[in-house]
Image: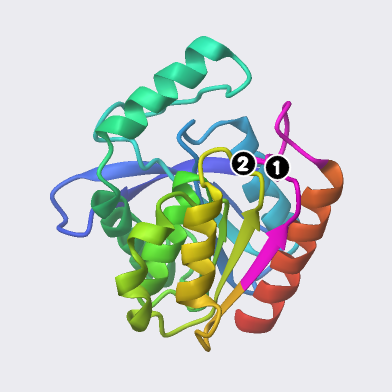
Amino acid sequence: MGSTHSIQTFDHEAEFGAYVATPEGTPKAAIIVIQEIFGVNEGIRKKCDGWASQGYLAVAPDLFWRIKPGIELNPDIEVELQEAFGYFGKYDANDGVKDIEATIRAIRAGIGELGGVSKVGAVGYCLGGKLAFMVAARTDIDASVGYYGVMIDQMLDESHAIANPLMLHIPTADHFVGPEAQAAVHAGLDDHPRVTLYDYEGLDHGFAAEMGNRRDEAGAQLADGRTVTFFAEHLA
């Protein structure tokens, strides 16, 4: 269902790859799927394919291309998990926002032979959840969703710039985002008119992964159902 396309950077000085899944017929909107620290791996591609089956153009940009293009890692394999942490330590999320903004621009202009799509949302996981928040605050993305985003508590001073709807899924037993950080996110965002927060009691980081040991089926189904409804409303 998917193929690889090239997207120009925001400054037009380079390009990076993106996995693109296309629906049958005219897309009703587009969704950017923002990777975890494991790259555009099989799980992220499955996320894209799932959105395409629902009528969306789905695009997953390779955000680690400056470090090493084409990274695909498995979080259930310890050596690959540690490799991913190493990439995360080198990665500048500000570059990620620029690349996602370039992806938004490419989608609206038309990727390859695909016609442009005006309404664009984003959904991200882990690092991608953080980037979903940043993109909501720094770009004109039409709607954003973040799953177990890390370090959002350290960026709440940007929340005033969120102009379009943002939804965050927060597992209460996230071993990367502790209770104090979760409390700070709630204190900073509960009253924001554009932000919706959902807690998932007792669930851990990665509970909505498409495959592997981290997935909690009931939690993933609940969160993903809310995401589907959210995009149906805000990307219509």
Within 10 Å of disc 1 (Cα), the crowding (few <14, some 14-19, many 20+) is many
Q: Is residue 205 magenta?
A: yes
Residue receiving disc 2: 205
Residue found at x 45% / y 35%: 37
Badge 2 amino acid: His
Instruction: Note whether 107 is above or below 43 in the view shown.
Output: below
Residue 138 in view of the camera: no
Q: Is residue 85 left or right of residue 44?
A: left
Residue sticking out furthest to the top: 79
Q: Residue at label 1?
A: 207
Q: Position of residue 151 (x, y in %)?
A: 40, 52
SS state under label 2: loop
Please indicate whether residue 154 sits to the left or right of residue 130 in the image.
left
| Residue 159 location (% of width, % of height) | 37, 76
Magenta-colored span: 197-216
Where residue 124 sits in the image (x, y, percent)? 53, 53
Q: Are marks 1 and 2 in contact (CB under 8 Å)?
A: yes
Q: Quadrant of the C terminus?
A: bottom right
Determine whether, in the image, residue 9 is placed left or right of residue 124.
left
Q: Position of residue 58 (x, y in %)?
A: 58, 56
Q: Identify the residue at image location x=71%, y=39%.
A: 210
